[in-house]
Image (spheres, rainbow, N blue to C red):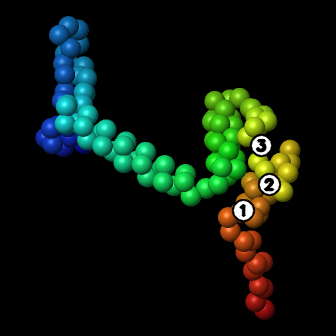
Amino acid sequence: MLDRLEEAGLVERVRPTRGDRRRVTVQLTKSGRSAAAGFWDDLHDRLARLAGEYSKGEVRLLRDFLRRASAILDGRELQPTPDERPEQDVVPSPFANRETIRMAPSPRRPAAPPPRRVR
């Protein structure tokens, strides 16, 4: 992959002046930085448009979820911040698990009817 990126002029391999000659640092070139900036700018614009499809309350809920999920991944647990508590009928349960979360209806879509059993 590095060979292809280097051939495209997006990265360059830089060898340190001292030390181990087997060691190589890969750096973005000017055109590589420009391509990366374009990628992130486009991603930012698309995500901003997506966020615009949600209400302020939904955005607060998503922000709180992502903040708390990130903390869990870091080995911590956070409580909801008072200004980011969801303004919905759903009451968080300390007993939530994968099964209850999977079965919870989405606020954006009506709950699916239970599957019919075929005899």
**Residue 60 in picture, x, y percent from top left:** 68, 45
Q: Is residue 116 above or below residue 42?
A: below
Quadrant of the frame with the C terminus: bottom right
The local secondary structure at tag 3 comes to: loop
Disc 1: which residue: 107
Disc 3: which residue: 85
Q: As shown in the figure, which amino acid type bears the numbered disc 1?
A: Pro
Q: Is there CB contact under 8 Å for labels 1 and 2?
A: yes
Disc ID at residue 88 = 2
**Residue 65 in picture, x, y percent from top left:** 68, 43
The local secondary structure at tag 2 comes to: loop
Could you give the CA–CA distance between mark 3 and mark 2, rounded to whole angstroms? 9 Å
Q: Which of marks 3 and 1 is nearer the N terminus?
A: 3
Q: As shown in the figure, which amino acid type bears the numbered disc 2?
A: Gln
Mark 1: few/some/many CA within 10 Å (<14, 14-19, 20+): few
Q: In this view, does 31 lie to the left or right of 74?
A: left
Q: Nearer the viewer, residue 77 or 16?
A: 77
**Residue 30 in picture, x, y percent from top left:** 19, 31
